[in-house]
Amino acid sequence: MLLSNLLTGAALSAIAIASPTNMGLLARDDPKPPDYSVCALNEVPATNNWAIYAPLDAVGLDGKCGNHYLNNLRGRCGVITTWECWHVNSDGDHIDSHDEPENVEGAVMTFYTSVFCSSDDVMAAMGASAQNDERPDSCSEPPKWMLPP
């Protein structure tokens, strides 16, 4: 019976560790998207949870949201899971780029990688993807408006 309880507890712990939350609980209070690219990392056991922001002059509106970024991130980091990309306005609110293209300020992209994908890899992929060659200098805690809706 004791062994059964220990195994059940270990299995539940493994499930909890393997089910990361959206960017943890820490987030800065930056009220609005900046005019420069942002990289945020949340290290979760066995994986890394990323959120990146690119202003409109870096990400553009051609094609699927963040597609150039996704391709370059795969090249640097390998497998990318739970990819999400959405456009935001000047307040950081999610908007439909087809209905309001004139109000798009940039794009937020969130995804998971293995722990072997480093901040340097993500920042290099961001620089290679950006239409203006811009990349952040570091990755930090995300602003609240950058967290998934």
Image (cartoon, rainbow, N blue to C red):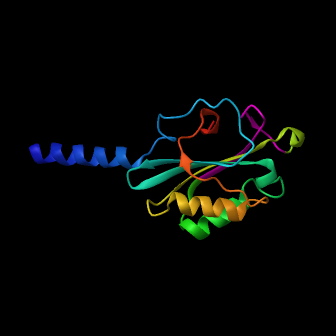
Query: Most extreme residue toward the front, as rendered?
Result: 137
Question: Does residue 109 show up?
Answer: yes
Residue 74, located in which quarter of the rendered image? bottom right
Where's the C terminus, which quadrant? top right
Using the image as rendered, state which of residue 124 and residue 9 is in the foreground: 124
Question: Does residue 1 show up?
Answer: no
Instruction: Look at 12% across and 48% down and name the residue there.
Output: 3
Instruction: Decide whether residue 96 is among the magenta residues.
Output: yes
Position of 140 compared to 2: left or right?
A: right
Query: Most extreme residue toward the left, as rendered?
Result: 2
Where's the N terminus, which quadrant? top left
Instruction: Look at 72% across and 40% down and name the residue there.
Output: 34
Using the image as rendered, state which of residue 28 and residue 110 is in the foreground: 28
Q: Is residue 65 above or below residue 97?
A: below
Using the image as rendered, state which of residue 12 and residue 114 is in the foreground: 114
Start and end of the magenta stretch? 83-97
Residue 26: image location, x then y, percent:
48, 35
Instruction: Look at 44% across and 49% down and name the residue there.
Output: 43
Residue 55: image location, x then y, percent:
75, 47
Q: Is residue 130 above or below residue 53?
A: below
Position of 75 compared to 87: left or right?
A: left
Residue 121: image location, x then y, percent:
56, 63
Instruction: Look at 42% across and 48% down and name the residue there.
Output: 44
Q: Is residue 40 above or below residue 95?
A: below
Residue 54: image location, x then y, percent:
71, 49
Instruction: Decide whether residue 6 is among the magenta residues.
Output: no
